[in-house]
Amino acid sequence: MARAQALKPIDPAAGTNRELELLRELEKKVLWLSTWTIHHANHIRPRADGLKVGGHQASSASVATVLTALYFSVLRPEDRVAVKPHASPAFHAIQYLLGLQSREKLERFRAWGGAQSYPSRTKDTDDVDFSTGSVGLGVAMTTFAALVQDYLHLRKGDAAPPPGRMVAIAGDAELDEGNIFEALLEGWKHDIRNVWWVIDYNRQSLDSVVSDRLFTRIDGLFTSMGWRVVTLKYGKMLEEAFSRPGGDALRRWIDDCPNTRYSALVFKGGPAWRAALERDIGDVEGIAELLRDYDDEQLHDLMTNLAGQDMEAVMEAFRAIDDDRPTCFIAYTIKGYRLPLEGHKDNHAGLMNPAQMEEFRAEMGVPEGEEWERFAGLKIEPDELQAFLDRVPFAQGRPRRLVSEVVPVPERLPAPRAERMSTQEGFGRILNEISRGNDVLADRIVTTSPDVTVSTNLGAWVNQRGIFNRREVEDVFRAERVVSAQKWSLSPRGQHIELGIAENNLFLLLAALGLSGPLFGERVLPIGTLYDPFIGRGLDALTYALYQDARFVVVGTPAGVTLAPEGGAHQSIGTPLVGMGLPGLSYFEPAYVDELAVILGWSFRHMQSPDGGSVYLRLSTRQLEQPGRELDDATCNDILNGAYWVVPPEPGAELAIVYSGAVAPEATAAHRQILEDIPGAGLLAVTSPDRLHEDWLAADRSRAAGRHASAWIERVMAPLAKDAALVTVLDGHPATLSWIGSALGRPLSALGVERFGQSGEIQELYRDHRLDEDAILDAAATALLRR
Ligand SMILES: Cc1ncc(C[n+]2csc(CCOP(=O)(O)OP(=O)(O)O)c2C)c(N)n1
Ligand SMILES: [Mg+2]
């Protein structure tokens, strides 16, 4: 690919060894600054609560070499990077050296308004590409970003700018997370390119030293998925020692040394290495001479000279790659390298004390008071260092966050008409209608689903728009003239990305698609579908996507006990609370398809608005008789605000029934029944419990701040009597709507699902879970009694 020319191997004859010297100096600075940043946060500007924070010092030291090599030489502006959570100080130190991070933010690391503990796209100001923090997710994210880059590139063809590399600096313990392997498999299926994972193989995680046997497996795993594996094990000094008499025995000794023992010796230092080597291989020819040639300090340097912390070895490995094949670098490192914490199994939470810091400062040659000076203590002249930094390829061509045009969305999406329809079916039909259009909106929508494309009603859209694939693959069933309603043809022009069943992957792909604008300069409008209960399976990845402010629509369907015969394993209960509980996600649960059309149109705008967000639609497979009405603008507005009167109450009415979603017929029937006893009772449809709730909290906050405000739920309910009783009902947890009672200070009886369900007819399940007409009438009586 185009970038190969830019990354020529280091050629000493061409004078690039000077680059190596500059990088070594900068690496020292990165190590110093990251160590000092954490020291500062703990000892110079300690927290008011006295709480000390470890977990960064040893972990950052571990990858100082790799990060220095990448950011100051190897990376290009189009590359995108996920840095392992605890290397945050090293990342910020590098941005500081590049003039992209302020001293004040570093001084306030982990404090209010300062640099974040873990690299954050939304909270940090020095252009974090991918947030990290929940281990495993940032790493896998790079795979899906590469897939999105391919999607955009293959559609554009030759007009596309050169692709970037999606790079993860991963902690070795991140490979314990299953989502890594789910992503590997999916990446293989999609034949992804331009992904680099650099695994910081320090053989340590949070609690202890990682099992030796793990990494004998890892190599094979990556290779079997089509990756190139580059192992960076021994540094140049050790390689040189191995070529001496006795060198073979020395290599074998290190190879065979268990992780725990190696780590302990790293911590203990020179004399301990000497004693161990003398005892184990002292009688091998050449070893005695070899040991004699190194004093204790030199012996320690030699025995800890792993390739992942040897600048020359690291640069050679990176520069040797000149194609787009996914590559995993296993970089052997020592956690806490060059710090007094190095190698100790407890060092993750370890912190250098002030005395150790003083010693380290002297070693680094940094004078007191010059701790934040960019070049203090370095051997190369500041002018030369600055000139080098000014030329760093990564920092050319700012800004990193790209701007893309807004996709126009019609004022109203046409609502499909039918006497009976489910919201899921309506969703499929609305998309089908869009797909027939030849407009930008149809062109920018990308759908994806983890193996439930057809069963979540994306079939018609896929028939029109095709499935994305790097190469054309014909629909074999069609070619063989096997009759099917579903076309399944694959091509680089396809607009649906089919995934395997892993829900983590769905949300990571939505995260990547939902950031395609800022990452790749082209906005897409992603829609992902899955069975509603399995949101739980991918919940951390969904949270992760939202934390980065990725913009997408997720459709959970079918939902609730309403998909009755499928049984309890497929019936979702708490997902409405997930929808309400996640920031950046607006949850809607419409009952009728005309409401859904209004909501979907708004969603396409909301996900493009600077202060907008993502949308969660909880849809049902229950076919409901459709109202066959024309919605006026005011009702559309109310639907978007979260609630509207299906039957408005008479002024001073004593009761209202409030429902959300698929239980509309039961609520309607109960309401009709009640009118006989309580004339003027209202029937309120809640289209978004989430928006309604959020608006109420906002109004309350405004009032607390002394401003005049009212919430939509208060205004819409205003016609009711002051002490009117309320019944709420939905196919989901009752807490979704029960808050309305306290919001209005009115007696309320809440119906919903609290227990796992089972197979049956809808009516049987509604009876069992008290969602039927009788239950609503009972609840109304109970609420009325409380007045
Ligand atoms: C999903 C998740 N579980 C637990 C944690 C707590 N945690 C933070 S770092 C870490 C282990 C880090 O080990 P490694 O990835 O090897 O990084 P290192 O510190 O060695 O560089 C754990 C368990 C987390 N951040 N995310
Ligand atoms: Mg580790």
Image (cartoon, rainbow, N blue to C red):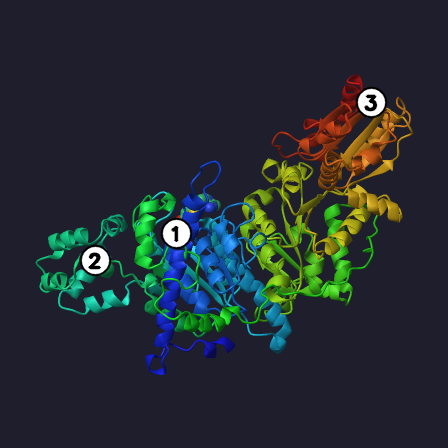
For label 1, the crowd category at 10 Å Cα-Cα, with few meaning under 14, some 14 to 19 and many 20 or more, is many
Specify which label sits upstream in the sequence, 2 or 3. Answer: 2
Q: Nearer the viewer, mark 3 or mark 1?
A: 1
Q: Secondary structure at mark 2?
A: helix
Res. 224 visible in picture: no
The residue beneath circle 3 is 723
The residue beneath circle 1 is 59
Q: CB atoms at circles 1 and 2 under 8 Å apart?
A: no
Task: Measure the alpha-carbon separation of dots 2 and 3.
Answer: 82 Å
Mark 1 Cβ inside 8 Å of ligand 1: yes
The quarter holding residue 313 reads bottom left
Mark 2 Cβ inside 8 Å of ligand 1: no
Q: Residue at x 62, y 64 (%)?
A: 477
Indicate left or right for 550 with 774 as reference.
Answer: left
Q: Position of residue 247 (x, y in %)?
A: 17, 65
Specify which label sits upstream in the sequence, 3 or 1. Answer: 1
Q: Nearer the viewer, mark 1 or mark 2?
A: 2
- Residue type, numbered disc 3: Asp
Q: Secondary structure at mark 3?
A: loop
Q: Please, is residue 757 above or below residue 144 in the view?
A: above
The residue beneath circle 2 is 297
Task: Measure the alpha-carbon separation of dots 3 and 1.
Answer: 60 Å
Res. 5 visible in picture: yes
For label 2, the crowd category at 10 Å Cα-Cα, with few meaning under 14, some 14 to 19 and many 20 or more, is few
Q: Residue at x 52, y 68 (%)?
A: 395
Q: Secondary structure at mark 1?
A: helix
Tell me the quadrant of the picture where the C terminus can be found. Answer: top right
